[in-house]
Image: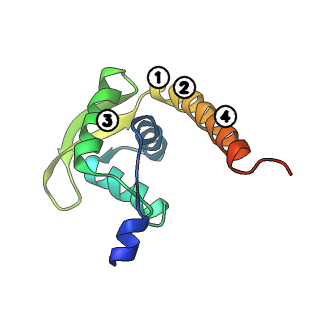
Amino acid sequence: MSTKEQRERIELLQGTLDLLILRTLLLGPAHGHAIAKAIEFKSDDVLQVEQGSLYPALHRLIKRRWISVQEGVSENNRRAKFYRLTAKGRRQLVVETSKWDKLARAIARILRPAE
């Protein structure tokens, strides 16, 4: 990745990362590294997920019972924790998506006021 591409990447806010993790797990269970890579890939490498942010977010979501965790073996035969969206997490994803949409519309009204 070039220096310019690194500068253009965006670090995520806590609540935003939670939302993106929930959305990623809607597709099925995944281990932490796969979650981070999926978010980066789907954002065309604009969004970066650092381990120092990802794992605290995963623990926070487990504590809220929005996701669950289970031991397993990754695609490269290593022990890994697999995270899965719970029923409560699916409901929360709807709530969080609605909040995000409302926030995005409010910011857009400020950045691009009607002429």
Tell me the number on the disc at residue 91.
2
Disc 1 versus disc 4: distance between alpha carbons?
21 Å
98 or 12, which lies in front? Answer: 12
Q: Residue at x 41, y 47 (%)?
A: 12
| C-alpha gap between disc 3 and disc 1 | 16 Å
Q: Amino acid at mark 1?
A: Lys
Residue at 27 percent across and 51 percent down: it is 50
Q: 71 left or right of 108? A: left
Q: Secondary structure at mark 1?
A: helix
The residue to which callout 4 is attached is: 102
Foreground disc of the pair 3, 1: 3
Which disc number belongs to residue 57?
A: 3
How far is the residue under mark 2 from the one under mark 1?
A: 5 Å
Residue at 78%, 47% (x, y): give it. Answer: 113
Tell me the quarter of the picture where residue 58 sits. Answer: top left
Residue position marked by numbered label 1 in the rendering: 88
At which x and y percent is residue 77? 15, 58
Q: Residue furthest right?
A: 115
Q: Nearer the viewer, residue 66 or 109?
A: 109
Contact, mark 2 vs mark 1 (Cβ under 8 Å): yes
Q: Position of residue 91 (x, y in %)?
A: 54, 25
Q: How busy is the neighbourhood of tag 4: few (under 14 within 10 Å), some, or many (20 plus)?
A: few
Mark carried by residue 23: none
Q: Earlier in the sequence, mark 4 or mark 3?
A: 3
42 above or below 61?
Answer: below
The tag earlier along the polypeptide, 1 or 4, is: 1
